[in-house]
């Protein structure tokens, strides 16, 4: 399977040289990052070109990168602060995109990720793009290329507020009738904004502001784990070997 | 003469044939369906968002509650995604156990499907027959995990515990006594593996019983043959997977094409349909049950011969045993860290899929290096299948909506997430 993926990334390089970013993870999965203005173009080629033949779209989802790489609890140095820092600190959802702490390599907030499968070549690919505008993220709809994207785009619109240009029926899908906000955005509270109950006096269902306090049970922690830095280890080993080598 | 307008009707949200809570707005021309608009989300619990707020292991239980009739398959996809990011692999014995329980799950799922969609179309007996055997798959779940349905059994790096050496027995009661008690306990005298083996050996004869009830049944055929026909091209376009795709004649099964766990060692066939109608999908599922029984037997054989670990010995991810904690400080520290903070997963993203009974169940995981996932997206087969509802029922009669809904094999736990 890995050899197939190798061919795939070669073909991608041939076909889209310079237009897309190709990356490959350790388990052989190929991922490409496409600029949003090339989104439809690349998708069409991936479906129709016989080298790719991605006949089926398995999955589409939105991702909100607000707070990516942010921890709630400093772990590099010892400190005498307690757990409350994690509860009150700068966790995801407690700051705006414009106030975000410096984060590496993420320039845009909203991303759309698509997973494709080619049954002819028995391979998968994931294709991602970033929506340009954080206030009104817009991505062209893939619905004419793969019909299965219909409800996925409605879901991403409902959950993240990503607008898919050209979708014929972009309604909310999972949330309540008359719902406001986009619940999977990182700045939408986990406990929600309103609660629903049946009011006996009024004889109908009423919506009220949510009463419970949000709680953090386990703080979000980023650990620098040396086991996953194989490159660093190799580099360090090389440097050590160089320093030991006799100077010429 | 007044103007003739189409009639709009609500199907659900509380309808016994809706297989959960779904509101289906049907536009009718007489009794013919012009448009069907499913309104979903009544069971939306925000599983994906909840998973973002918890350490990785605490979300395994949520996976059971997605497709709540094929619990372990959902866990399998999630656990595999974590394993791939961590770069670990479960021991061989655990892989065999997973394979076996995935197939037990498949039988359990298809049993519920055949029972309930039979019931929807007026076949009462099949429901009672199917639930008789389904109960045994639940007993297997219970014996291995302690829970009949929401097992919470798979873990990154293996499965929670090894297969038990004994099966719980029925006790005498006013309802179960004498011959009946003896019959019910007949298979339960040995280990769990003995019970599973006895079940899997006997099961094909039970499938024969179902087939005598339905396969040549005139009413069943009238309700399913030629209903909800999907061509192979459309099936691909609409994102169909699993029996829905194979019913249309596309030979595609992740267990064969992109094998995971121990499926590459298993000998089994992939049934495909010809016409792509409800009847063909029924035949595909029936044959899948027979194949599952054969896979289970192959796993039982291997598991009997090869005792061993079912969890990795990697204290960074898998907690040490109680016993080890008693006299090892390191083990105690690892245990404490794992249960207060969890493990951090290296930065990256991964998509892992399994062939769940309903189709491809996938888990897309984004990690930023924290002890909680940054984003989890669950690709549920039922969600895509239901989105094709409009196309499948258009032009059919009102009564066929029930047949199509049955053939989609939808469960709202996974559609709404």
Image (cartoon, coloured by chain):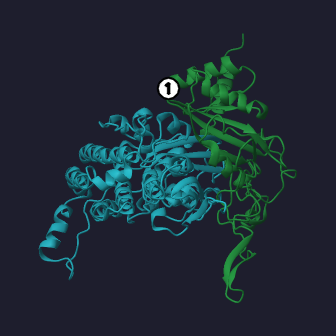
Chain colours: A green, B cyan
Residue B37 drawn at (x, y percent): 60, 56
Image: B113 above or below B180: above
The number of numbered badges drawn on the structure is 1
Name the outermost residue toward the right. A98
Name the outermost residue toward the top. A248
Neighbor class of circle 1 (other Cα within 10 Å; few <14, some 14-19, many 20+) is few
Name the outermost residue toward the bottom. A201
Horizontal arrangement in the rendering, residue B231 relative to residue A204 (left or right) = left
Q: Quadrant of the C terminus of chain A?
A: top right
Name the outermost residue toward the front. B1
Residue B14 drawn at (x, y percent): 52, 70
Give A80 or B231, whichever is nearer the viewer.
Answer: B231
Horizontal arrangement in the rendering, residue B67 relative to residue B104 (left or right) = right
Residue B330 drawn at (x, y percent): 52, 55
Mark 1 residue element:
loop
Residue depicted at 55% across the width and 25% down the height: A5
Q: Toward which corner of the image does residue A84 lie, by quadrant?
A: bottom right
Residue B176 drawn at (x, y percent): 20, 76
Horizontal arrangement in the rendering, residue B308 relative to residue A224 (left or right) = left
Image: B185 above or below B198: below
Q: Circle 1 sits on which residue?
A: A120
Q: Toward which corner of the image does residue A73 lie, by quadrant?
A: bottom right
Q: Toward which corner of the image does residue B349 lie, by quadrant?
A: top right
Residue depicted at 63% across the width and 42% down the height: A149
Please report, as a chain letter, where disc 1 is located. Answer: A
């Amino acid at each position: 399977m890995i050899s197939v993926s190798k061919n795939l990334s070669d073909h991608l390089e041939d076909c889209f040289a310079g237009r897309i970013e190709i990356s490959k993870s350790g388990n052989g999965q190929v991922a490409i990052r496409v600029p949003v203005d090339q989104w439809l173009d690349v998708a069409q080629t991936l479906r129709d070109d016989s080298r790719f033949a991605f006949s089926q779209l398995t999955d589409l989802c939105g991702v909100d990168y607000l707070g990516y790489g942010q921890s709630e609890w400093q772990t590099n140095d010892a400190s005498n602060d307690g757990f409350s820092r994690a509860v009150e600190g700068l966790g995801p959802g407690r700051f705006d995109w414009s106030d975000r702490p410096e984060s590496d390599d993420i320039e845009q907030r909203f991303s759309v990720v698509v997973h494709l499968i080619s049954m002819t070549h028995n391979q998968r690919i994931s294709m991602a793009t970033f929506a340009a505008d954080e206030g009104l993220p817009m991505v062209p709809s893939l619905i004419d290329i793969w019909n299965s994207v219909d409800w996925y785009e409605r879901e991403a619109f409902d959950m993240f507020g990503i607008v898919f240009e050209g979708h014929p029926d972009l309604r909310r899908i999972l949330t309540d009738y008359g719902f406001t906000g986009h619940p999977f955005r990182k700045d939408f509270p986990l406990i929600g904004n309103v609660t629903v109950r049946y009011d006996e006096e009024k004889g109908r269902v009423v919506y009220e502001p949510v009463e419970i306090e949000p709680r953090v049970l386990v703080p979000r922690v980023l650990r620098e784990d040396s086991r996953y830095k194989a490159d660093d280890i190799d580099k360090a080993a090389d440097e050590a070997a160089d320093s030991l080598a006799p100077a010429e | 003469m007044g103007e003739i307008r189409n009639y709009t009707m609500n199907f659900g949200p509380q309808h016994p044939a809706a297989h959960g809570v779904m509101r289906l707005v049907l536009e009718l021309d007489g009794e013919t369906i012009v448009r069907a608009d499913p309104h979903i989300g009544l069971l939306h619990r925000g599983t994906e968002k909840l998973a973002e707020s918890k350490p990785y292991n605490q979300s395994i239980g949520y996976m059971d509650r997605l497709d709540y009739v094929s619990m372990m398959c959902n866990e399998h996809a999630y656990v595999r995604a974590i394993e791939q990011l961590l770069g670990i692999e479960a021991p061989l014995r655990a892989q065999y156990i997973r394979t076996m329980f995935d197939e037990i799950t498949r039988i359990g799922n298809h049993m519920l499907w055949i029972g309930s969609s039979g019931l929807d179309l007026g076949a009462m007996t099949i429901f009672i027959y199917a639930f008789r055997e389904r109960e045994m798959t639940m007993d297997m779940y219970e014996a291995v995990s302690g829970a009949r349905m929401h097992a919470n059994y798979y873990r990154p790096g293996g499965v929670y515990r090894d297969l038990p050496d004994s099966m719980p027995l029925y006790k005498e009661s006013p309802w179960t006594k004498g011959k009946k008690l003896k019959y019910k306990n007949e298979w339960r005298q040995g280990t769990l593996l003995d019970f599973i083996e006895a079940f899997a050996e006997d099961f094909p004869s039970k499938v024969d019983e179902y087939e005598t009830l339905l396969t040549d049944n005139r009413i069943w055929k009238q309700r399913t043959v030629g209903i909800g026909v999907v061509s192979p091209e459309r099936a691909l376009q609409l994102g169909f997977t699993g029996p829905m795709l194979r019913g249309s004649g596309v030979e595609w099964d992740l267990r064969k094409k992109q094998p995971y766990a121990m499926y590459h060692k298993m000998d089994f066939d992939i049934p495909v349909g010809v016409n792509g109608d409800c009847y063909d999908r029924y035949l595909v599922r029936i044959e899948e049950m027979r194949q599952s029984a054969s896979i289970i037997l192959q796993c039982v054989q291997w598991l009997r011969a090869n005792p061993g670990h079912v969890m990795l010995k990697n204290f960074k991810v898998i907690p040490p045993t109680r016993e080890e904690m008693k006299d090892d400080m390191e083990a105690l520290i690892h245990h404490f860290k794992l249960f207060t903070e969890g493990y951090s997963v290296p930065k990256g993203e991964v998509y892992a899929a399994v062939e769940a009974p309903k189709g491809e169940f996938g888990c897309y995981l984004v990690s930023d290096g924290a002890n909680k996932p940054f984003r989890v997206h669950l690709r549920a087969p039922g969600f895509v299948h239901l989105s094709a509802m409009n196309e499948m029922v258009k032009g059919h009669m009102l009564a066929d909506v029930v047949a199509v809904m049955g053939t989609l094999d939808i469960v709202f736990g996974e559609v709404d997430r």
